[in-house]
Amino acid sequence: MLRRIADLYRSGPDQPLLADPELVRRRYERMRWRCFIGITIGYGLFYLCRLGFSIVKKPILEAGVLDAAQLGRIGSSLLFVYAVGKLANGALADRSNIKRFMSTGLLISALLNLAVGASYGYWAFLVLWMVNGWFQAMGSSPSGVVLSHWFSDRERGTRYGVWSISHSIGEGLSFLVTSSIVATLGWRWGFWAAGLLCCAGAVGVYLALADRPRCYGLPTVADYKDDHPQVAAVSSTVSEAQLVVLKSPAVWILGLASACMYIARYAINNWAMLYLQEAKGYSQAGAGAALSAYPFTAMLGSATSGLISDRFFGSSRNLPALGYALIEIGALVALYRIPPGHAALDTAALAVFGFSLGSLLCFLGGLMAIDLSPKRATGTVMGLIGLVSYVGAGVQDWVSGALIEADKVVTASGTVYHFDRAFQFWIGASIASALLALCVWRAKRRE
């Protein structure tokens, strides 16, 4: 049985190369664009099935279903499993038929969201959300493999940046649409609506994606675009290339920088909704509307970051990454210091934070590490960066939940939550991310 499953998901054999150059061009371009649209929309849908608890925290707290510490542990359970799954599924993605692999992950994640919406009790939520973390990890690394197989070195920065808007598509839909559904129909529909939409999305992902070019009689993208690395390739197998990645200090440092950046990212994703409602007096729908500015500007940051670094910095990512990190820190401080009653300023701070974070997600979240690593191990690079990043995100949810729960004040009129120590934690992590990224300023690609 296991062998049959493995065979079903294994990448197909190389086919004889097509002889007609015009046929190769037409087929290549059609499949490249179909795959690119598929991973961009498809990975965005993964986020709909990941952010359910971020949207429904206040309704769940008010209903007495869970407390803040339990919500933090549930959130971190997904992220810790997701971290391990990123590395494991990244290694599998290097050998897999991506269209089957990625669509399966989205489908099962959607079904788990439907189950969470019908569940009761802390332990049911915890276990289901933990399992969801594993299948959520079948989205990012396959997307990186598609980019590596179908787009050449000169194109990758721009394509990776545009693909990175997928994070923001999912986040924007969650904050804007899911929040409105929850405000109207109740917190369980935060999970049911996401699950139903992503069941349909999984079918679309399967139809859009494709296996490696050689499986269709097409040349490798390096041959098709005549864009070969300037360094001599030494790694002759996928396993050897993966070992190079795992032994690279620069990749691990970038992973740590990304982990610290993810602390700030998931602080906003998972706690800003509650922060705006508790500390600044927003309604459920109002908080969702303010937060929707963040993912939409993140799209702009992601889409332009790779293009800017390719066009104006000779495909070097270091200097623009530093600039975006400083902007992100400033925006986070502003969101914390702006007093209640200034919705326009809150929205502006979230918009600036989103733009800078979207750019950093492109650079620290994978592109800089891909630039430094063998192309045959792209899935492993994405998996390793994801492993370290989401350990950081999981620690954030656990620590943030504990800090917010410990700092709450129970009064005769209700419970008041304070965020001072949580914000200090988030801002400190952003500063650490910028400092760590400086350590790989002179790192070079390894083969």
Image (cartoon, rainbow, N blue to C red):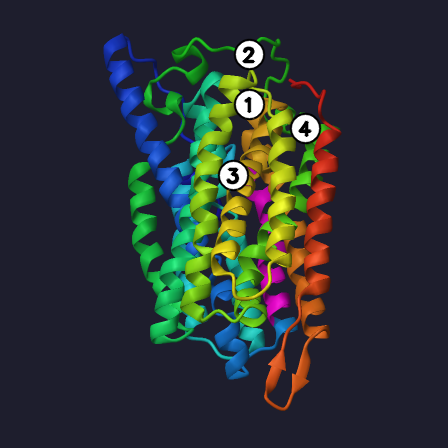
Residue at 67% in and 57% down? 396
Magenta highlight range: 71-92
The residue beneath circle 3 is 141
**Mark 3 Cα within 10 Å, few/some/many (few <14, many 20+)?**
many
Q: Could you tell which of marks 3 and 2 lies nearer the N-terminus?
A: 3
Q: Within the magenta stretch, is there residue 88?
A: yes
As drawn, the residue found furthest toward the bottom would be 412
- Magenta: main secondary structure equals helix
Nearer the observer, disc 3 or disc 4?
Answer: 3
The percent coordinates of residue 102 (x first, y second) are 42, 43
Q: CA distance from mark 4 to mark 2?
A: 19 Å
Element class at badge 1? helix
CB of mark 2 within 8 Å of CB of mark 1? yes
CB of mark 1 within 8 Å of CB of mark 4? no
The answer to whether 108 appears left or right of 364 in the picture is left
**Mark 2 Cα within 10 Å, few/some/many (few <14, many 20+)?**
some
The percent coordinates of residue 66 (x first, y second) are 57, 78
Is residue 4 shown to the viewer in this render? no
Front one among 46 and 289: 289
The residue beneath circle 1 is 375
Residue at 48% in and 43% down? 298
Q: Amino acid at mark 4?
A: Leu
Q: Amino acid at mark 1?
A: Lys
Q: Within the magenta stretch, is there residue 98?
A: no
Q: CA distance from mark 2 to mark 1?
A: 10 Å
Q: Could you tell which of marks 2 and 1 lies nearer the N-terminus?
A: 2
Q: CA distance from mark 1 to mark 4?
A: 13 Å
Front one among 35 and 311: 311
Q: Amino acid at mark 3?
A: Ser
Nearer the observer, disc 4 or disc 2?
Answer: 2
Residue 243, numbered label: 4
